[in-house]
């Protein structure tokens, strides 16, 4: 059985079945499914598949969980599982002011999906670059607009700024083009 997990930061920690179950449970909850037996079965399948490795990284775990979920025809849960990290450090803003003036609850998933779509349009398939960019974007939004509303235009500028800062010029260009379509 996997004994250690190498985090994206490089830090290593003891493998935790509890954390694995919690993340699967959270993804299932987001997908509107409540099935403890399924959560246990998926966690067991993941642990069985990873048992030959002493050290696994978070990407190994993510891929293995999604493989088990898709094999069980729970594609939507896998989609949510891939987004669980978005909620690790919640962004504390009141919401978003849309271009037409409406106020809406902030959805990190919607922002992620729009950035992810532009990564695909730009031909960039690096999930780690996408995640790091999103973490920067959410961090800036959370600090700059804590307990306030952020306009869609300001959010777009922050996304563009982060993409350029991370030298993702093609993605930044596509994002700006995509947001004006």
Image (cartoon, rainbow, N blue to C red):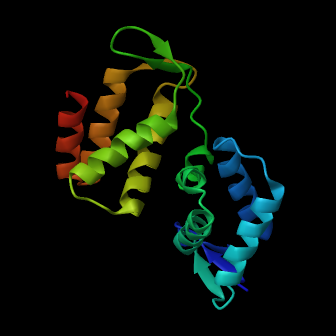
Q: Position of residue 35 (x, y in %)?
A: 79, 52
Residue at image location 50% in from the left, 39% down from the top: 109
Q: Which of 79 and 57 is in front in this view?
A: 79
Q: In this view, does 82 lie to the left or right of 113?
A: right
Residue at image location 78% in from the left, 70% down from the top: 17
Q: Position of residue 11 (x, y in %)?
A: 60, 72
Residue at image location 41% in from the left, 42% down from the top: 113
Q: Can residue 165 be seen in this view?
A: no
Q: Which of 156 and 164 is in front in this view?
A: 156
Q: In this view, does 114 lie above or below 5?
A: above
Q: Is residue 171 visible?
A: yes
Residue at image location 29% in from the left, 51% down from the top: 119
What is the quadrant of the N terminus in the image?
bottom right
Point out the residue furthest to the top here.
101
Q: In this view, does 33 lie to the left or right of 134?
A: right
What is the quadrant of the C terminus in the image?
top left
Point out the residue furthest to the bottom here.
52
Point out the residue furthest to the right here.
37
Q: Position of residue 75 (x, y in %)?
A: 55, 56
Q: Which of 172 and 70 is in front in this view?
A: 70
The number of numbered badges drawn on the structure is 0
Residue 48 found in image quarter: bottom right
Q: Is residue 74 left or right of residue 179?
A: right
Point out the residue furthest to the front here.
73
């Amino acid at each position: 059985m996997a004994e250690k997990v190498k985090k994206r930061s490089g830090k290593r920690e003891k493998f935790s079945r509890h954390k694995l179950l919690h993340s699967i449970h959270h993804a299932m909850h987001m997908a509107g499914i409540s099935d403890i037996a399924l959560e246990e079965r998926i966690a067991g399948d993941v642990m069985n598949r990873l048992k030959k490795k002493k050290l696994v990284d978070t990407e190994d775990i993510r891929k293995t969980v999604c493989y088990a979920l898709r094999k069980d025809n729970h594609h939507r849960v896998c989609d949510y599982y891939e987004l669980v990290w978005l909620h690790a450090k919640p962004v504390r803003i009141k919401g978003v002011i849309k271009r037409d003036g409406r106020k809406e609850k902030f959805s990190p998933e919607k922002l992620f999906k729009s950035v992810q779509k532009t990564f695909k349009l730009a031909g960039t398939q690096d999930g780690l670059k996408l995640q790091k960019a999103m973490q920067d974007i959410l961090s800036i939004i959370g600090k700059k607009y804590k307990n306030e509303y952020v306009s869609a235009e300001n959010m777009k500028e922050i996304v563009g700024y982060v993409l350029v800062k991370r030298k993702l010029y093609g993605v930044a260009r596509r994002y700006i083009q995509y947001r004006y379509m």
